[in-house]
Image (tube, rainbow, N blue to C red):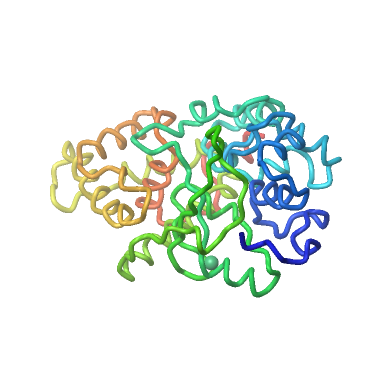
Amino acid sequence: MLIQGLDRDVWSPINGWLADDESFFSLCSRIHFSVGFRRSSDTCRLLFGHPAHGLQHDFPARLSSFVTVTGGHFGSAAQVLGHTLFPFFFAWMQVKSAEQALVQVCNERSSYAWRFRLRTATCGVSPDHPLKACPACVETDLLQTGVPYWRVHHQYPGVWVCKMHGCLLSVQLRQISRAGALSFCLPSIEEMTFVDVVRSEELAAIGRFSEFCVASVRHLALRSAASQIWRIGRALEEFKPIDSPRRRKQLESAARSYVAYLATLRQAPGVPVLAADKYAAMAWLWKVKYGAWHRLHPLVLLSMAHWLLGEWREDACPGDASSVR
Ligand SMILES: [Zn+2]
């Protein structure tokens, strides 16, 4: 393991978060190595009062327990939650539902049910979220502090390019105990599986979409998902078919254009499930057009928003969170 032999003070969690974008799993992994337990389950018992519920890098449970045990040293449960994947999914919920869910997540004893509540397994998107890291970031961390850490933004679904270095993220293999539980770990070049190289134009396009996904969390917290769906719906309404002048073919024509856009994104690892034919794309566009967008995975909504809008706009529109609150 990379951290063996390093000065303990360097990677000790006593000084708090390593950076604003450090993930909660990264912090827990540092605590695990700092306290010196051999098994991750012992660290989980210490921090979460359960042998496994804190090991999920995407949706950890018992955050209130963690805050109590650590005396609030790393912030409140809601602040800690900001370093997980919950905000990415909460962004696409109604404002009131997200606020209620936030309280529930902090106090619930298990997070397994959230995978279903947050639509992590709809539209053919895998509910498994691989641990991703940028090899160049890991090398930089090792040079600067000696401690590589997990960036929470790199873990978001749809993010496959590091904004800082412009390279594809790699997936880290995780050790599994004999009981089947995953272990705490920090990024390690030796344990990464490098993904296939994509062409530079595709890499640039995937990079733009990655940035769009990261920006969505902050943007939707201000503007609400409902207002952005309204914007997407209007852009879809205004979509001008190039290949068919007939209006009744508009949705079919839009679906063809959407599929062509998705073809580039499908080159990124982990997103080959995004609609490959116009019929699946039409079904998704239909749901947005007629108000059933809650049934779509956030990754689908993000791809649709990026295809139609290109970037998040700061100007207000009907249903903005700021006007609701
Ligand atoms: Zn990087």
Judged left or right of residue 273, residue 59 is: right
Relative height, residue 170 to residue 137 (above, below): above
Judged left or right of residue 156, residue 68 is: right
The number of callouts visible is 0
Query: Residue 240: image x %, image y %?
Result: 24, 50
Q: Name the residue nearer the viewer: 211 or 304.
A: 211
Relative height, residue 94 to residue 222 (above, below): above
Q: Name the residue nearer the viewer: 145 or 214.
A: 145
Judged left or right of residue 68, residue 302 is: left
List the single residue furthest toward the bottom.
Answer: 143
Quadrant of the rendered image containing residue 127:
top left
| Residue 320 visible in the current orientation | no
Query: Residue 185: image x %, image y %?
Result: 61, 51
Relative height, residue 114 to residue 318 (above, below): above
Position of the C terminus, as image quadrant, is top right
| Residue 295 visible in the current orientation | yes
Query: Residue 54: image x %, image y %?
Result: 66, 36
Position of the N terminus, as image quadrant, is bottom right
